Amino acid sequence: MVTEKKRRSRYTSVAWARAPLQESDNFQPAKESLENGSESLNSVAHSWPLQTPGSELAYDNFDDYIRLTERQLFQADHQSDILIADHYSEGLVTRKLDVLLAQGSVSPRVALEALDQSFWGQVLAIYEEEVGMMYPFLDITQLRQELLDGRTLSAFDYATSLYGEGIENIAFLVLAIVSSFEGSKAVKIVSPIVKEAFISTIPKIHLQSPNLGDLTLLTLICIFFFLDDREKEAWRLIGTIVRLIHEQSSQEEHTTLDKISDTFFWSLYTLDRRWSFGTGLPFAVQDSEINRPPLTTNESSHSLAYLKEMVSFCGIASDVRSFFLGTLASRFQGSSSNQDYLQFRVLQWQQSLPLRLKFRGTEDKFDVTTEKRGDYKLRLMLYLRANQMRTIILRKAASRFGSH
């Protein structure tokens, strides 16, 4: 029970609404208001107090508001995706894993052979909405095509797969990530397989030139670690991957680098910044050392547009970190002009967002008839991240200036 409450505190995703567990007493008033749809985001926030950060360097406590908002967003979208919602209210992934376990064992190969197309289609859809749209390092369209077309491993052509033989573990890690939304029972089943994949892959990336499949698998393991309340392990591993790709780029090792797209790199960059900022631990690579070209987008992809704006946001976050904790901290001790400048940059970034990514405040309600839920979620996340950064700047500045 303690583990269950801890995990929900760390990542209260929309999937938790699909598999509701017993909420704490503090959450009941907020839940009742969410169900009748009468409460605004602002008033919901007041009913959900922030937890006290574990240390001075823990910035990510604001995510509690973001995760609670995701619950409200799911309630607004209850008329769509009914099949998935109904399945997950019953713990579909957990039940499937239980069946595999009862039949003998759970492994990536067994999962690919035994679980049908409909199930994998649902798993991939949930992953894409919960993780993939914000961090599009995994080509979910390609993975879906390969998984649903190659139904048996005996007929599966690894040579034509984008991820080679690693597709087994990659598919299972996607399943493991989705299973973490259901609860500790599912996580307990998949954790040994995730650990085995981690132990077998880590030496490869250090002893030989890593391929795209290995890097993708390890990035998925990072996300699984984070969802399993192992944020420092996620930070450590994502830093290793980012540094490796950066080193190859600096040394112009094009053989492997040609396969590492800019979308892949910048997705990992934003993960590194998020977990570094959340834990107070160092960035894997400093912005001044990165020689990757800026991310290009197209008009049809909300996901790539979101990622491009988050890369810019992470640049501001890097400067905020330098001002309050880095080498610039002592130089600007007691200076309010730099605080004002950082606030200005956040506001300027928010105001310059493309129209399709702008959130118009608490009255901007989700309408399933005019917008996809995932697109609405991206707009909302950018809005909340901007508020998060402004709050951090004001809190840290008030703490610093108030002590002098």
Image (spheres, rainbow, N blue to C red):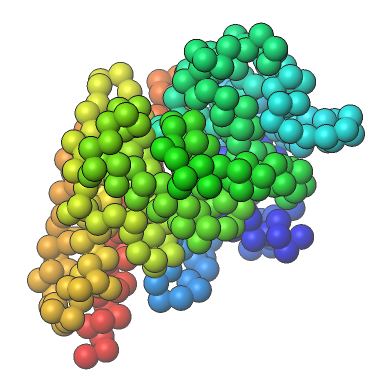
374 or 35, nearer to the observer: 374
User: Is 211 left, or right, of 124 in this rendering?
Assistant: left
Residue 96 image point, x, y percent:
78, 30
Residue 326 in view: yes
Residue 402 image point, x, y percent:
25, 86
Residue 316 image point, x, y percent:
22, 55
**Is 332 above or below relative to 87?**
below
78 or 129, nearer to the observer: 129
Residue 215 image point, x, y percent:
46, 38
The residue drawn where x is 27% and y is 31% is: 254
User: Is 86 left, or right, of 349 in this rendering?
Assistant: right
177 or 287, nearer to the observer: 287
The residue drawn where x is 26% and y is 81% is: 400
Quadrant assignment, res 345: bottom left
**Is 244 above or below relative to 132?**
below
**Residue placed furthest toward the bottom:** 404
Residue 12 in view: no
**Is 276 above or below relative to 36?**
below
404 or 283, nearer to the observer: 283
Q: How many marks do you count on the picture?
A: 0
**Residue placed furthest toward the left:** 337
**Residue placed furthest toward the front:** 207
The residue drawn where x is 51% and y is 42% is: 204
Tell me the quarter of the image containing the N terminus.
bottom right
The residue drawn where x is 33% and y is 23% is: 301
